[in-house]
Amino acid sequence: MRYIGDIYRPPSEAYSLLVQVTIGCSHNKCTFCNMFKAKQFKVRKPEEVLEDLAWAREHYRRVERIFLCDADALCLKTEKLLVFLDYIKEHFPECERVTLYGRATDVLRKTDEELLTLKEHGVTMVYMGAESGSDKVLKMVNKGETREQLIAGVQKLERLGIKTSVTFISGLGGPELWEEHAVETGTMITEMNASYVSLLTLILQPPAPMYDDYREGRFKTLSPEEVLAETCLLLQHAKPSKPCVFRSNHASNYVSLRGNLPMDNESMIASLRRAMEGRGLLKDDRFRML
């Protein structure tokens, strides 16, 4: 397999075959993100991708999951994605699911028919970084998408039977916007009705522009207790109408949470409050990482 630059994948794709169909991120302007700043966005040549898939077929006896990299492979035209999906279907008959990152604007740009075709050809889930439910926070971090677009994108995929896994970031609004960030994110989760929701905690690293803001005092991060208070408030407002798997057990999180929304909201809030009362329950910063 050939990879260009660092490769990032969701935690749940740890045992998946990673196939790079795009290089970098087509947006790549989010101020909190450092992952793709060293890459210039590029679409890989189809023949190169097919060569990598052929190499994988030759070397791996069984491939049950395939994740298409990089940041938002869904930005590719449907006909280009179908070339890869059809090859996977023919040469990896044991593959149970194909997943990829996608932006809400990628989803909204495609017709229902296009998305249903992708589903029929193997796409089972789209990972989406929503980051925040607050338009103020989204604008502040230069997300390039609005609350309305993010909700509409997730609802569209779920309505068509394609699962979504949506990620948000604790502490992204800083001390000034933490309450709005929490409440608006909670209500966004309610409206989206995604299949999966995950919550990371903000860790700033160079060359993310927000890292410079933090070093120079223009942006302040939340304390561990403030992050937990924000998460409690978020959970109080996250009440989707269908069961949603919720995970806040990433390496960046101070407290590990696992449950289903909205059934387990109260028990998860209770766990957070216990951690706030006893600091010994918080993960040490030395062990938090991306």
Image (cartoon, rainbow, N blue to C red):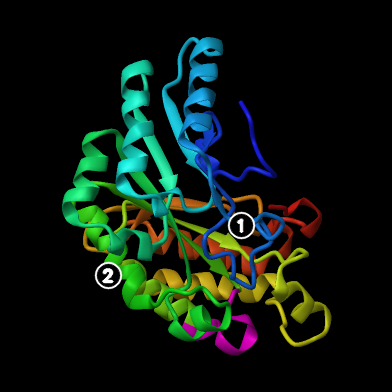
The vertical placement of 196 against 9, above or below, is below
Give the label on residue 191, or none. 2
Q: Secondary structure at mark 1?
A: loop
Give the label on residue 233, or none. none
The vertical placement of 39 against 15, above or below, is below
Q: Residue at x 31, y 23 (%)?
A: 89
Residue type pointed to by label 2: Glu
Main secondary structure type of the part rendered in magenta: helix
Q: Quadrant of residue 40?
A: bottom right
Q: Nearer the viewer, residue 146 or 183?
A: 146
Q: Which residue is mark 1?
A: 255
Q: Nearer the viewer, residue 252 or 44?
A: 44
Q: Position of residue 224 (x, y in %)?
A: 68, 70
Magenta segment boundaries in residue numbering: 172-180
Report if residue 104 is visible in the image.
Answer: yes
Q: Quadrant of the N terminus?
A: top right
Residue type pointed to by label 1: Val
